[in-house]
Image (spheres, rainbow, N blue to C red):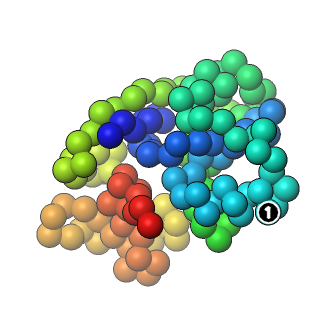
Amino acid sequence: MSKLQISRFRTTAKEFAFDGCHKFYIFEDDRVKKEMMDEGWEEKEFYPIKKLPEMFNKCSCALRFIDRCTPNGGFQTIVPQFQNRTTFSWVNCSKKDKSIPAAMKKMTHCTKCACELVSRRDGWKFCIRCGWTQHEEVFPKKE
């Protein structure tokens, strides 16, 4: 399995949405695409994930950003606006790769609700308040 790594974030997304100017939305779940289309996004605004690095660097304005969309309208900022140092790389991972990325090891607070994270026995951290785990961030669930 191959994952796109965007700066420190890894995704298994197969598609992304681009508004033609500066808004990039990645999603791992097909339900999100349906929700976006229900909100007015058109099929022509969705692209294969392999085009993201080139389109981000060559086809967008300076206000560009990348957000990860989750079902029911949730968002997580992957690349904030005006961040000039965005790197893209492809990472080959076996399905058994459950290692904790170095950036995740340093995390102390939840990216959803900003609460302090608690460590599990296996080294991954989680949030008691909202249930977010680093494992879900790196290895999204497939339903």
Side (left or right) of 16 relative to 141: right
Q: Which residue is at a point 37% across and 52% down the rendered structure image?
A: 138
Residue that badge 1 annotates: 38
User: If the image is split into quadrants, where does the C terminus sit?
Assistant: bottom left
Figure quadrant of residue 4:
top left
Question: Does any portion of residue 108 appear in the rendered image?
Answer: no
Side (left or right) of 100 relative to 25: left
Disc 1 residue type? Asp
Is 114 rendered above or below residue 138? below
Side (left or right) of 88 relative to 62: left
| Residue 55 placement (x, y as % from top left) | 66, 25
Q: Residue furthest bottom?
A: 129
- SS of the residue at dot 1? helix
Q: Which residue is at a point 71% across and 34% down the rendered structure image?
A: 64
- Of residues 111 and 19, which is closer to you in this image? 19
| Residue 98 placement (x, y as % from top left) | 22, 52
- Of residues 32 and 137, which is closer to you in this image? 32
Q: Which residue is at a point 27% across and 39% down the rendered structure image?
A: 93
Question: Does any portion of residue 16 appear in the rendered image?
Answer: yes
